[in-house]
Amino acid sequence: MAHDTATKGRHAELIAVTALLANGWTVMEPMVPDAFDLGITRPGWTELKRVQVKSARARNKDGTDWIVVPGAKNNGSVYSKDEADYFIGVHQGVAYMFENREICEYWVKPAELSAKWTKLDASIGNLKLEAI
């Protein structure tokens, strides 16, 4: 089971990296375990943004479909803004980025997914070299 969880998490990270690169971000990974999964910046920027990558899951609550991304660590504490500036939730192979609001779960209706969270198109034809 642990191998499956680690493999799924790494797969989500690789999808996020691909999508970020296609959208003009420079992507870095910490050399040692840290609260964030990726560091991102843009050419010409002097700041680094920290990103936590999570696999999103579909959930039905009271007859309504939702996409849910966990905002908490394994110990139950939420990621603070000092630990992660953004989350990327990977749902059905697509990366969606949104700001860390320091809450335990992020919920969005599937029909509102692209409107509320930034969809990162990972296709090579989308490659953007200019700042967004």
Image (cartoon, helix red, strand yellow):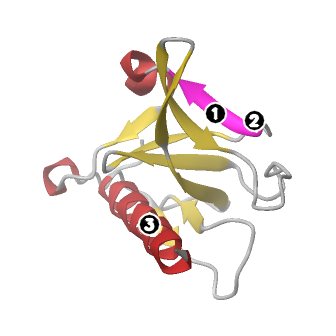
The single residue placed furthest to the top in the displayed view is 63
Indicate which label's residue lies in the foreground, 1 or 2.
1
Task: Check residue 8 in the rendering and tell me which mark sits there, or answer none.
Answer: 3
The single residue placed furthest to the bottom in the displayed view is 31
What is the CA distance from the residue labelled 3 to the residue labelled 2?
Answer: 24 Å
Give the mark, 3 or 1, whose residue is nearer the N terminus: 3
Mark 2, Cα crowd under 10 Å, few <14 / some 14-19 / many 20+, is some
Residue 40 occupies quadrant? bottom right
Type of amino acid under label 2: Arg
> Where does the image place residue 98, in percent across and percent down from the top left?
57, 38
The residue lying toward the viewer, choosing from 83 and 76, is 76
The residue lying toward the viewer, choosing from 58 and 40, is 58
What residue is shown with label 1? 106
Give the residue at x 27% y 52%. 122
1 and 2 marks in contact (CB < 8 Å): yes
Task: Check residue 23 in the rendering and tell me which mark sits there, or answer none.
Answer: none
Type of amino acid under label 1: Tyr
Give the mark, 3 or 2, whose residue is nearer the N terminus: 3
Question: Could you tell me what secondary structure mostly forms the magenta stretch?
Answer: strand
Give the residue at x 33% y 63%. 18
Drawn side of residue 114 relative to residue 49, left or right: left
Indicate which label's residue lies in the foreground, 3 or 1.
3
Q: Secondary structure at mark 2?
A: loop
As for residue 19 lying within the magenta part, the answer is no
Residue 106 occupies quadrant? top right
Mark 3, Cα crowd under 10 Å, few <14 / some 14-19 / many 20+, is some
What residue is shown with label 2? 101
Q: Secondary structure at mark 3?
A: helix
Give the residue at x 39% y 68%. 11
Give the residue at x 23% y 54%. 127
Type of amino acid under label 3: Lys
Q: Which residues are magenta?
A: 104-108
